[in-house]
Amino acid sequence: MQQHFGTLSIAWKATKAELSQVEGFGFQTLEKVVKQRSRLHPEQLLIKHQEENPHFWTPADADYPRLLLETPSPPACLYYRGEVELQENLGNKPSVGIVGTRQPSDYGIRWTRQISTALAKNGFTVVSGMAEGIDTESHAATIKAGGRTIAVLGTGVDIIYPPKNRELYKQILTAGLVVSEYPAKTPPERSHFPKRNRIIAGLSRAILVIEAPIKSGALITATYANDFGRDVYALPGRIDDYPSQGCLKLISQGASIILKELDELLKTLGAIPQIDVVQESSAPQQLSLPDLAPELQQVINAIASDALPFDFIIQKTGMDAGSVSSALLQLELMGLVSQLPGMRYQKV
């Protein structure tokens, strides 16, 4: 609906006839949406939501994490607590995810601490899930080394899970961020954790799997990372060690091996390209397309040579979201603009 109408605000006010034009809306879905909408009072819901969730981003916000926006399914709301770092959100600071089993061996703990410490001391943000085991060790080691870390939760950002990580949670709030796609007061549920793994992968330029059994959630994170085009690394272990089976499987499928020489790992991670941040040009190059209507010309002139997020187009043109959405649709139909994942647009 957001892609069709440009903003959810416009979608909410759309008539039944306008809603019927949304792709994937059948008759039954349309009737349910119209019926439920009449029962809701968005102003009251918004007030309650903002009271319970004062800090959150949506994909329309300019400071929504760019790396996450590149993925096919960025959260409609990303709630957060802690210290925001704008350059991190813009993709200018390297971030690496560390994941693994909740029951690591001494070997896994030792290497998690060594790798996290090295990353922290070299300016990387360490992303993990604050679960027991490898996640906890990576956050704690990063903080101890004076680094920055992000914890992606499968609960609301106000819920500390597992409860034993209460002190770690407090430390993360002062040394980074706690984020979640679930609103405040959302308790831990089994189905939440596989879904949150896509956010860990989405916020990271690379994923390091330290120890993981064959059916580990860490392998889900690695799969997401691979699907998103992010690099995947795995720590090798003995072939008869249960916690290493998943890592060995990843390596057999092409994951890079984490070797003892961490300098090489740091060099490789540091070589991963940064996101191209949209810069305002003092004299933007105008396209000569005399047959275009003025609003279409304005939109296509605003789009840089690289992909531009929807909200940036609104900012550069000064047009409202509905007009920009309509113009982009027309430009797509004319073959002049193409849409990429995360509501980004580029010239063809």
Image: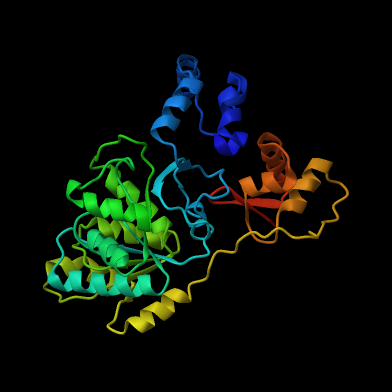
Q: How many numbered discs sit on the rendered protein? A: 0
Relative to residue 322, is residue 243 depicted above or below?
A: below
Residue 142, percent from left and from top: 31, 66
Q: Is residue 65 above or below residue 241?
A: above
Please say whether residue 22 is visible from this viewpoint.
no
User: Which of the two residues, 280 or 167, is positioned nearer the viewer here?
Assistant: 167
Q: Residue at x 68, y 46 (%)?
A: 315
Q: Is residue 126 left or right of residue 166?
A: right
What is the x, y in percent for residue 180? 37, 45
- Vertical arrangement, residue 287 with respect to residue 122, above or below: above
Horizontal and vertical percent for residue 121?
Answer: 37, 74
Please report the residue visible at 33 percent of the width from the left and 81 percent of the height from the top: 262
- Asked whether residue 311 is in view, the answer is yes
Q: Position of residue 234 (x, y in %)?
A: 29, 71
Image quadrant of residue 157?
Answer: top left
Q: Decide if residue 204 is on the left or right side of residue 172.
A: right
As rendered, which of 80 and 268 lies closer to the eye?
80
The residue most toward the right is: 290
Q: The C terminus is located in which quarter? A: bottom right
Please report the residue visible at 32 percent of the width from the left and 55 percent of the height from the top: 172
What is the image's colouring?
Answer: rainbow
Q: Quadrant of residue 285?
A: bottom right
Query: Image quadrant for the N terminus?
Result: top right
